[in-house]
Image: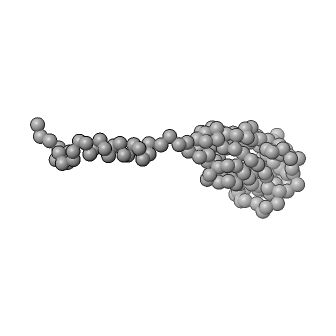
Amino acid sequence: MKSHPIRSRIPKSAIVGCALVLFATGCTSSEALPPEISVDISPVNVGVWSTDAAPLHFDLQLRNTGEEALVIQQVIIRGDTRCSFAFQGPDKEQISGKEASFIRGWYDPDSVGEDHLAIEVTSNATNYTTFVIPLCGKGVSPGTTDAEAAECAIPPADQGDCQDNYQLFPAS
C-alpha cells in the first residue's frame, strides 16, 4: 500500500495536537450573533391611490437577522406633512433572534399630491442603532389611470402635525 506523501511526513501526534489547539482556541463558537435589524422592502412605495378609495392597508416587517433579542426603543414618523398615513405598532417591542415584528400602515390621501415620510426605528441593533425606512405614495383624482408613482425620498427632519394618526411604541 502506497502512503500519501504529505501524511507520511507529519507524525500522527502532531496532527492530533494541532486539532486540540484549534478546538481549544475557538474554531467552533457557541456565541449568539448580536441583534441586527432589516426590513422586507426599502424604500416602501405604496404607489398611486385614488383620493376617494378606501384606505390602502400594508404591513411593514421588521426582522431581527441576529440571534440575540432585538429591543425596539422608539419608533417615530417624520415628514408626513399631509397626514395621509396612519400607523400602528410594532406588534412586539422585543424581537427574538431570527424573528419578525410588524408595523401596520394605512395610506389614505385626502387630496392629489405626493406624500413622503420616514419611519425611524431606534433599537439595540448592532448594524443600525437608528434604522430609517423611507415611505411614499401618490394621491390621484378619482378615475385617474395613467399616473406615475412617486419616487421615495427621505423628507426633512420635521415630524409634521399628524401624531394623532400614529399608535407607535412607546405611546406618546
Residue 17: horizontal and vertical position, in percent?
31, 44
Between 90 and 82, the one lying in front of the other is 90
Residue 33: horizontal and vertical position, in percent?
56, 45
Q: Residue at x 86, y 50 (%)?
A: 163
Q: Quadrant of the N terminus?
A: top left
Between 71 and 114, the one lying in front of the other is 71
Between 7 and 111, the one lying in front of the other is 7
Q: Is residue 150 visible?
A: yes
Residue 20: horizontal and vertical position, in percent?
35, 42
Left or right side of 114 for 70: left
Q: Residue at x 59, y 39 (%)?
A: 98
Residue 131: horizontal and vertical position, in percent?
68, 53
Q: In the figure, residue 56 lies in which quadrant?
A: top right
Left or right side of 114 for 33: left
Q: Is residue 100 above or below residue 82?
A: above
Q: Residue at x 65, y 49 (%)?
A: 125
Which residue occupies the extreme bottom position in the image?
Answer: 156
Q: Is residue 133 visible?
A: no
Model colouring: one colour
Q: Residue at x 83, y 57 (%)?
A: 159
